Amino acid sequence: MRRLFQSIQGKIWLCVLVALVGYFIGSAVSASLHLFQYRRFSELESRFIPLVNGSDRLLGLFDQQSAEVESALLTGERDLLDHAGTLSSKVNVTLQQLGAVSEAYDDRLSLEELDALRKGYQDFCQLLEAIELGGDADHLIWEDHEKIQKLGRQQRQVRHQVEQLCERFHLDLVHQIEANKQRSVFGLTALAALFFSVLLCAALVSRWISVRLLVEPLGQVWRQVESFERELQGGDLSRRFSGDEIEQLSDAFHRMVTRLDRTMVSKRYVENIVNNMMEGLLVLNADLMVEKVNQRTVELLALPETEMIGQPASLLIQGAGKAETFTDRLSLVKEGGRVHSIEVLGRRGDGRLVPLSFSASAVLDDRGRSTQIVCVLYDLTRIKNIEEQLRQLAHHDPLTGLPNRNLFFERIEYALADGKRHGRIFALLYLDLDRFKPINDTCGHDIGDLALKEVARRLLDGVRADDTVARIGGDEFVILLSALPDYATAGTIADKVIQAIAPPLSLGSLTHELGVSIGISIFPRDGTSRDQLIDKADQAMYEAKKNGGNRWVESV
């Protein structure tokens, strides 16, 4: 091994080997961090998202079954009660699917809640089967009054359990998203620090090797050449020495002096490395003007290299909304500092902004002055898209795209705080579609979904831009009317909503007319808390239903 590195070529290869080892260590750790992040996103896709979607589907099925049971008890129709019983199999299948996902990830808490929910639902089904319909509906209510009351209490208890399960699954998803964001930031920071450490260690080891095996022997040769020149007093130094490579180097030393300021690695070799980097590269001069870019930067910013060279860096890159501007960061780097993986925005040639991770360090001369700044850019578009998709799933209804129950609760809490602070009036409209069930029964759920999407579009067109329209389950919607000038305005907007739903729906080759029953509660007249306003609006909606539907009723 010692003889292997005795030649100059062997010593150079030793330095290259040290640098390659450091590079491969950093690459291996980088691959491990990316694999870990991929597994975290895979767990979101296979665990938390199915739990959120399944719990929402479970709540919709149970609400549908409860509505049919209530209709059957009111009308005394046995067929309607039997149809409600057929939904039990779908509810049980959904519970089994949720249990399978929870069991696959050994989620004891979810399994316990699902077991409790399953038992409560079985009791609900048993109470439902114990009710016998027949004869006069008034006679049924009088004879089976106690059974119906027990069924109602069990129904409310089961629905409360389902709502709690949905809320916990949604909160778990949100917490996982936030945790993954923090892990991503930590991983990028740790990766940059690791690469810097590995490169620093490789540089120190290479420097030690070069000094020990190359610089010191070359210094000895230099001293020998000076001594030899003085002895010869201007004699010819071009004659060759015999012996090893170090002695041969002394013979060519006077020709190497004129080339000491040139790079030891060919320009083409360096350009090939730079242009094949997976990250974008910007080299800035001391005035923060662009001197060099690689091919990846051209692709990221969609600008020709000739248009970027000589331009200020601030025209191509800008800060991502932080208090400290991008130019301030570059000024710190110019003074000898470093920037690791900060988020910036790159301005493309078409004017569009692309999110980037930005790292930079200064190149110093022998006097410690900054001559250039080397910047590395990494495209964050894919990561940002995944984060946006996860946020959309956590706060919006997957069918209509409207805010879901979680986002609606956040906005009504904000409206309560704003109303109490500034004395503003706002209203809550609780909507339930009339004549929607026949669409699902006769045309199928696909046509029903198309109808719900059209209803959502009409609701958005019928309210103001700063109002909130949310779908909270099945064919139920809520509208938050903010900053009303007076109480009467809520009724005026409710009339517009009824008019917006009234025109027939075109569902493929079919048309169908829908109506809407609306219950209205107003802050602060009808309550000063979220639950009070929702309950009052819900009660008013049922009053509108009892009065024939397709109308609005204010809470009393």
Image: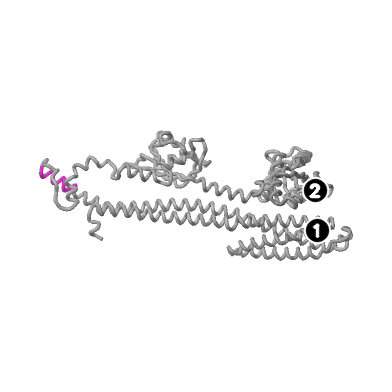
Q: Is residue 434 left or right of residue 382?
A: right
- Residue at (43, 50) in percent of width and height: 192
Residue 367 in which image quadrant: top left
Residue 518, horizontal then vertical, whole percent: 78, 45
Tag 2 residue? 540
Q: Of the numbered discs in the image, which one, if any, rests on residue 79?
A: 1
For the residue pair 167 and 503, the one nearer the viewer reads as 503
Residue 109 in which image quadrant: bottom right
Q: Which stretch is magenta?
A: 222-232
**Residue kind at label 1, given as amino acid type:** Asp
**Residue kind at label 2, given as amino acid type:** Ala
| Residue 229 is one of the magenta-drawn residues | yes
**Quick one: label 2, few (<14), some, or many (20+) residues within 10 Å?**
many
Nearer-N-terminus badge (2/1): 1
Mark 2 vs mark 1, foreground winner is 1
Residue 412, horizontal then vertical, whole percent: 69, 47
Q: Of the numbered discs in the image, which one, if any, rests on residue 473?
A: none
For the residue pair 518 and 87, the one nearer the viewer reads as 87
- Residue at (51, 54) in percent of width and height: 183
